[in-house]
Image (cartoon, helix red, strand yellow):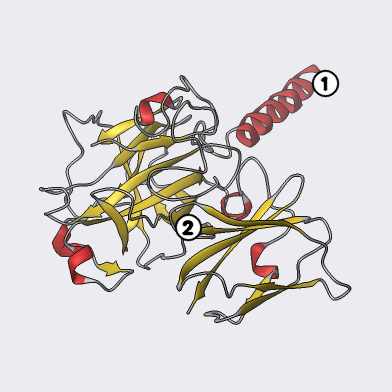
Amino acid sequence: MKFKFLIFIAIIALSGKCKAQLNLVPNPSFEDTLTCLYSGLAGINQCSDWYSCRSSPDYWTGCSQIYVVPNTVASYQFPHSGDKMIGIATYATQLAVPGLFREIPGVDLIQSTINGNKYYFSMFINQAYSANSNVVAQLATNRIGIRLTNTIYSPLSPVPINNFADYYDTLFHVDTAQWVKISGSFISNISFSKLMIGNFFDDAHTDTMNLDNDSITYQNAAAYYFIDDVCLSTDSLYAATWTGIKENQLSPFSISLFPNPATSSITIKGISSQFSQYRIIDIQGKVLLNQNFKPNSANSLNIDITSLPSNMYIIQFVSANEIISKKFFKE
């Protein structure tokens, strides 16, 4: 009887350990901070557990003295969860940054992968759009993914860009308002202790898209993405449903905005009574309109935009504990 009881206790203990380590990525939402001085500028070394494996990935926070989220240099954006996120360049033209420019962050896994086991990966990404600096973030790329390794890399000894990743996404992601979840699976062919995120493909094997369709702008442009809520797990359901430290109570896709593009007004449907404020922001992050409102009985709202110049804008709906963003174009 005592022997059976000990086996039962051991099973419970192991079950608890496995559950606690469903996500093998430490600090997956980047909320644990070592220092909080200069968001972005001091780089990812300000973020607990994370480090640079190539160039200078950025760390964007809500507690810094400069470039406080959501007003980053790269774009105006709130994190997917919490108040912190990282940012990486996945491509740059030769005039923008000479050489093979890639920013690749890395992290030591809580537990090494096991040879032959299947792993499921997911993370949220958001494309930055900005024309504020000499290197403008107006490009999109495909092939954003991950690579596992046991090698220690750094900016002085960078990970090689040799057209290999354990998983990469083949699509272009060009949504500058909403966060997009990318996910996939792979077999770990040996035991790995470290994970890296980025574009591991050279320029010849990376496709680019110019959001402005402007050849002059393109010459000095880069592709830049925000990253948040990273997950690596042997549990497919966990990886598929894990969304970070806080789940949205209202899916942004339940809100519809039309017409888009618009000329004189936009109509929003599906906006619930929990939201009491909206603001319209330009692509430079400047708040142009900030209004309190109450949805009508049909949970819809009509907004006059005749005073706005032709451009792309973001409208945000604000409640006590949530912000939902939608992108629209004014013709």
State the SS at label 2: strand
Q: Which mark is residue 220?
A: none
The answer to whether mark 1 and mark 2 are in CB contact below 8 A is no
Q: Residue at x 35, y 35 (%)?
A: 106
Q: Residue at x 42, y 39 (%)?
A: 114
Kind of residue indicated by mark 2: Ser
Quick check: 108 above or below 79? above
Residue 254 screen position, x and y as percent = 70, 69
Residue 176 screen position, x and y as percent = 46, 60
Kind of residue indicated by mark 1: Met
State the SS at label 1: loop
Q: Seen from this angle, which residue lies furthest top?
A: 2
Residue 41 screen position, x and y as percent = 34, 31
Q: Residue at x 83, y 62 (%)?
A: 294
Q: Pointer 2: what residue? A: 183
**Quadrant of the image containing the N terminus:** top right
**For the residues marked 1 and 2, what is the alpha-carbon distance in whole angstroms?**
46 Å
In this picture, residue 242 sits left or right of residue 105: right
Residue 290 screen position, x and y as percent = 66, 55
Count the marks: 2
Quick check: 96 above or below 86? below
The answer to which image quadrant residue 72 occupies is top left
Q: Pointer 1: what residue? A: 1
Q: Residue at x 24, y 67 (%)?
A: 207
Mark 1 or 2: in front is: 2
In this picture, residue 89 sits left or right of residue 157: right
**Earlier sequence position, callout 1 versus callout 2:** 1
